[in-house]
Image (cartoon, coloured by chain):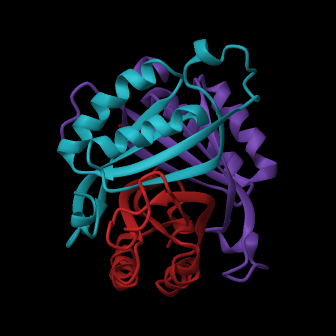
Chain colours: A red, B cyan, C purple
Amino acid sequence: MSRAGLTRMTKIEVVVTGAEGAAVRDLIQAVGATGYTNLSGVSGLGHHGQHQGRLLFNQQATLELIITVVSDDKADDLIAGLRPLLSASSGVMFVTDTYVSRPDYFT
Amino acid sequence: MSRAGLTRMTKIEVVVTGAEGAAVRDLIQAVGATGYTNLSGVSGLGHHGQHQGRLLFNQQATLELIITVVSDDKADDLIAGLRPLLSASSGVMFVTDTYVSRPDYFT
Amino acid sequence: MSRAGLTRMTKIEVVVTGAEGAAVRDLIQAVGATGYTNLSGVSGLGHHGQHQGRLLFNQQATLELIITVVSDDKADDLIAGLRPLLSASSGVMFVTDTYVSRPDYFT
């Protein structure tokens, strides 16, 4: 694919309960990310049965989807920081290659 | 990119009308996915002109965005199941490589 | 990953203020994209400190997330058109490989 003029970065999407959103945003800030996007109106059934075992498959918890895009070195720090936070909750993260037009916005 | 400690999975995003959301979630459950994320507050103009031909480009239908992350074998099953469902509607799906930290949550 | 029966396309996600959403949708239409998905309930702190310098890290602007999927040639046109629009604002775009089941819907 033509990616002329674009720079590869790492997109990290985190789905957590509303109660955990602030901790995720604090961590994003702590690793030096320059911003994030926050989606409300998010519900879902967790990927971890244990933590949401009382929910039937069509019952949904109220969640937040938090998206940030960072350089690789910050991605490593952020992923390392998110691991224990998510391990203590039912949150999940998705890490995806993405390309941006203005890498200076993200570093 | 450094992906140490992460496992590649398949993210499937489905955009459908609210009326079709339950069928998509049932299918996600049927293939053995362990969860999903559901976004409301979604509107759009379908990628298929035929089904939404009465809408002007800036008129938007009320939609849902449903995200799930699964292993490759379940992805094949889910994609196969979604094809006829989406063919009968104006829904679309996007299939993307992603990486997760806890693959056991998704298999 | 098994991608039998799927076609690679380019997913472009744009995060802009509500005031700029219409211009982004107009541009998506102008390059010949067949549709888009629009998410409301989006807030965030911009990746560009300069334009949102008055916000603290946990203060969030009201934003829109606009997603479209296009073929590579249209992606180049759209990215070229989005650059000046985003340069004049605090918006960002993320460009990601994705796969679809019905490429004719997107071209």
In the rendered picture of this protein, how many numbered marks are placed on residues? 0
Quadrant the N terminus of chain C occupies? top left
Task: Specify whether C42 is left or right of B22.
Answer: right
Query: How far from the left and from the top, in percent, is residue A77?
Result: 36, 82
> From this viewpoint, is residue C7 visible?
no
User: Measured from the top left, where is residue C2 in percent x and y?
Assistant: 18, 37
Query: Residue shown at 76%/29% (left/top)?
Result: B58
- Residue C2 vertical placement versus C106 (above, below): below
Residue in the foreground of this view, choosing between A4 and B2: B2
Up-down relation of residue A39 to residue B88 (above or below): below
Is B41 or B23 nearer to us in this picture?
A: B23
Q: What residue lies at 55% left-to-right and 58% top-to-bottom?
A: A43
Q: Quadrant of residue A71?
A: bottom left
- Residue at the far right in the pictured view: C19
Percent from the top left, x then y, of residue C62? 75, 62
Query: In this image, C81 relative to A98: left or right?
Result: right
Residue at the image position 75 percent from the left and 78 percent from the top? C53
Q: Is residue C99 visible to the viewer in this orientation of the structure?
A: yes
Q: Say left or right for B80 vs C30.
A: left
Residue B68 image position (x, y, % from top left): 38, 50
Say which residue appears at 75% left-offset and 67% top-offset. Answer: C61
B92 horizontally vs C58: left or right: left
